[in-house]
Image: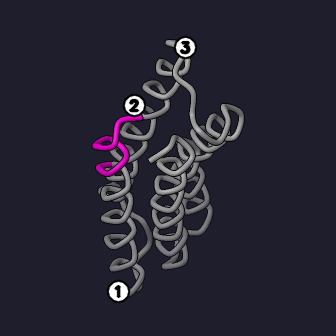
Amino acid sequence: MLDALTLVTGVAALLLAAWCGWAAYRDQPTKDWHFIGMAAVTLLSLIQLVVGIVLLAQGEKPEQGTTIFVAYLLGAFACVPAAGLMSLAERTRWGSVTVAAGGVVLAVLEVRLHDIWGG
């Protein structure tokens, strides 16, 4: 797996978490700018999903198993959009907290993906 892509996705997720955490601290819900940030992080995780599937199709294998690797890839891809949808349902500071938590979860999933691949 591409270490640089995993690192960039993880750092972007943590930056999104900090940004939404700051909004929650200031008692603000998620705003349009936050959704643009979520879209950027989701695009990075989509690229990672495609790269992972291409590597698997080329015959490369993760050290800890293909099934768990694909499951983590799909979970990483769905993490931030799911948090974004939940933040739409909760238009208070807790919506921002939800997205911040989703960003932290994505960063943890990135570390785990790196471990599963054999990093």
Three-letter amino acid code at disc 1? Arg
Asked if the residue under mark 1 is in contact with the one under mark 2, i.e. CB atoms within 8 Å, the reply is no
Q: Does 8 sit left or right of 25 as displayed?
A: left
Disc 3 residue crowd, few under 14, some 14–19, many 20+, Cα 10 Å: few
Q: Answer with the quarter of the image where residue 12 lies.
A: bottom left
Quarter of the picture containing the N terminus is top left
Tag 3 or tag 1, which sits nearer the N-term?
A: 1
Disc 2 residue crowd, few under 14, some 14–19, many 20+, Cα 10 Å: some
Foreground: disc 1 or disc 3: 3
Name the residue that disc number 3 marks.
57
Residue 3: say if magenta: yes
Q: Answer with the quarter of the image where residue 15 lies.
A: bottom left
Residue positioned most to the top: 58
Name the residue that disc number 1 marks.
26
Three-letter amino acid code at disc 3? Ala
Tag 1 or tag 2, which sits nearer the N-term?
A: 1
- The image shows residue 4 at horizontal and vertical percentages of 28, 43
- The image shows residue 109 at horizontal and vertical percentages of 53, 55
Q: Secondary structure at mark 2?
A: helix
Instruction: Report the predominant secondary structure element of the magenta stretch.
Output: helix
Q: Which residues are magenta?
A: 1-8
Residue at 55% across / 13% down in the picture? 57
Three-letter amino acid code at disc 2? Ile
- The image shows residue 104 at horizontal and vertical percentages of 47, 67
Q: Secondary structure at mark 1?
A: loop
Residue at 38% across / 44% down in the picture? 39
Name the residue that disc number 2 marks.
47
State the residue in front, 10 or 46. Answer: 10
Label 2 to label 3: alpha-carbon separation = 15 Å
Label 2 to label 1: alpha-carbon separation = 32 Å
